[in-house]
Amino acid sequence: MLAAPAAAHAQAFSDVTRAVVDYSKANTEPRKTCEAIGRFSSKNIAQIASTMVPGDPAAPEHCRVTGLLSPEIAFEVSLPSKWNGRFYMIGNGGYAGEAIDDHPSTSRRALN
């Protein structure tokens, strides 16, 4: 018999007012420009594109990189203009294939 998983106690990523660390302070500069990332080439990358997204109250300025790894693995990553040293990832966990902008109940409803 398997034991029930322990409750997760993760800190809300976007709640800077309750954060243990002040991750609103970002000092690390990128080593490559957003434009240069979009021109990156490799035998395993079927396509890649990058777009600079201006900051707004919901998210700071960042470089959105999308692409396709051969043969058909799509990816998307948002790289901040200044990094605070933290990493936040969503995906898989039984919901692989969801778009970041999908409403949670839309894709999960089909699985229930």
Image (cartoon, rainbow, N blue to C red):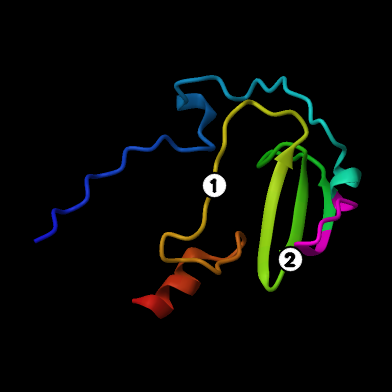
Q: Position of residue 89 (x, y in %)?
A: 54, 47
Q: Position of residue 83 (x, y in %)?
A: 69, 29
Give the foreground label among 2 and 1: 2
Q: Dot 1 corresponds to which residue?
A: 89
The secondary element bearing badge 2 is classed as strand
Q: Position of residue 71 (x, y in %)?
A: 70, 73
Describe residue 107's horizontal placement relative to residue 32 as left or right.
left
Residue 109 quadrant: bottom left
Q: Is residue 51 magenta?
A: no
Say which label, 2 or 1, has the lower sequence index: 2
- Decide: is 112 above or below 34: below
Q: Nearer the viewer, residue 36 or 79?
A: 36
Q: Looking at the figure, which quarter contains the N terminus? A: bottom left
Q: Position of residue 54 (x, y in %)?
A: 82, 42
Q: Residue at x 84, y 58 (%)?
A: 49
Residue range (magenta): 38-48
Describe residue 102's horizontal placement relative to residue 66 as left or right.
left
Q: Residue at x 50, y 33 (%)?
A: 15
Q: Nearer the viewer, residue 57 or 68?
A: 68
Q: Dot 2 corresponds to which residue?
A: 68
**Dot 1 amino acid type:** Met
Mark 2 Cα-neighbour bin, 10 Å: few <14, some 14–19, many ≥20: some
Residue 66 quadrant: bottom right
